[in-house]
Image (cartoon, rainbow, N blue to C red):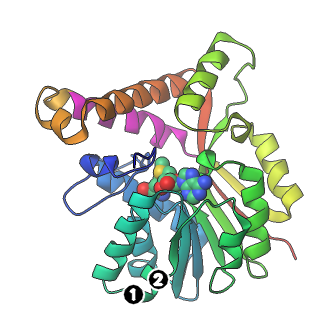
Amino acid sequence: MSEFHDLAELALNREGESWGNLGYWQIATDYSDACRALALLLGKQAGLDRQSVVFDAGFGCGDQLLLWLQHFRVAQVQGANLSYSQTSYATAKLANAGFPAAANAIVRADINDPEVWNAAVERSSHVLALDCAYHFPNRVEFFALARKHLAPAGRLALTDFMLSDQHRIGSFAHRLLRWMLKRSHIEEANIVRREIYLRQLQETGFSDIRIIDISEHVMPGFARAIQKLCQKNPSADVGKRIGWSGLIKYRLTSRFLEWAYRRSILRYCVISATKLD
Ligand SMILES: C[S@@+](CC[C@H](N)C(=O)[O-])C[C@H]1O[C@@H](n2cnc3c(N)ncnc32)[C@H](O)[C@@H]1O
C-alpha cells in the first residue's frame, strides 16, 4: 500500500537513524543531527523530565520516542501516527532498544480521532507534535483533544508553520503557496498568522503561551542540505537510494521552503502552552 508518509526519509539519514523532519541547522551540518537538534529543542521547550508522561502525536519512525526515553529519561511514552509503515518501524525500534511497554503504547491512528485519546493508558503531562501538526486534518481540533487529554497544568509543545505577517492573501505568491500546500497534504486552514495561532490556543483553553520564531535555523538549512545531497551524485548514489520521484519531491520542497523563507511567506516556530484549569 502506498502512503504519503512512508519510509522514504530513511535515505536522508545516517545508518541506523530514521528522522523525517526539517531539522534545526544552527550548528548541525548533517541531516540526522539537525533532526535530532530540532527534537532536543522541542523537548527542552516542553520541559521534559523524569516524571513526564508523553503523548507523541506524529512520532515518525520512532527516533524521537527514543530521545524522550533515553535523553530526557521520561517515565512513559504513548502516541499515534497516521502511517502504517512508520508505526511498525517505530514499534520494532522501541522493542529492539529494550522498551517493550513503549512499543505497546504507540498506535497507528489519525490524531483527530477522539478514540485514540480515549484509549491512551493514562493522562499525559505532555503532548508533543514534532514537525507534523500542519499535516493534521484540523489543528484546532487537535488542540482541543490534546487539552482534554492532558493532566492538570499539562503542557502542549510543538514545532509548526505559520503564515508570515508580511504575506499578502490573494497575491501570486499566495496562489503558489496554496498549490504547494495541496501537493504536500497540508490543510490550508492550518496555516494561519501568529496572532490567529495564539488566539486558537487561548480559545481552546491554554495559557502561558510561548511562540519562538526559529525559521532562520530551519528553512534555509533544510533547503541547503537537500540541494547539497542532490548535487553530490545525482545520477547514481542519491537517486538510487531515494528514488527519482522522492528526489523530485525533496528538490521541490527544498526550493519552495527557500523561496517561502526569502520572500517572508511562511515562518517556522516552536510553540509551548500550558493547560488552563
Ligand atoms: C514531517 S513528518 C515528521 C515525523 C517525525 N515527527 C520526525 O520529526 O521525524 C510528519 C508526521 O506526522 C504524521 N501524521 C500526519 N498526519 C497525521 C495524523 N492525522 N495523525 C497522526 N499522525 C499524522 C506522519 O505520519 C509523519 O510521521
Disc 1 from disc 2: Cα separation = 6 Å
Residue 97 visible in the snapshot = yes
* Total labels drawn: 2
Place of residue 271 in the rendered image (x, y in percent of width and height, measured from the top left): 65, 55
Q: Which residue is mark 2?
A: 104
Residue at the image point whose x is 74% and y is 82% from the top: 151
* Foreground pick, 22 / 48: 22
Quick one: SS at disc 2? helix
* 138 over 48 or under it: above or below: above
- Amino acid under label 1? Pro
* 77 over 182 or under it: above or below: below
Find residue 273 and report its image quarter. Answer: bottom right
Quarter holding the C terminus?
Answer: bottom right
Place of residue 114 in the rendered image (x, y in percent of width and height, measured from the top left): 73, 67
Residue at the image point whose x is 20% and y is 27% from the top: 231
Place of residue 83 in the rendered image (x, y in percent of width and height, measured from the top left): 47, 57
Residue at the image point whose x is 29% and y is 31% from the top: 247
Q: Is residue 202 left or right of residue 177?
A: right
| Disc 1 + disc 2, Cβ < 8 Å | yes
Q: Which residue is mark 1?
A: 100
Residue 38 visible in the snapshot = no
Residue at the image point whose x is 23% and y is 30% from the top: 230
- Amino acid under label 2? Asn
Place of residue 79 in the rendered image (x, y in percent of width and height, measured from the top left): 55, 71
Quick one: SS at disc 1? helix
Residue 163: numbered disc:
none
Q: Main secondary structure of the magenta part?
A: helix
The furthest residue to the top: 172
Range covered by the magenta-colored residues: 213-230
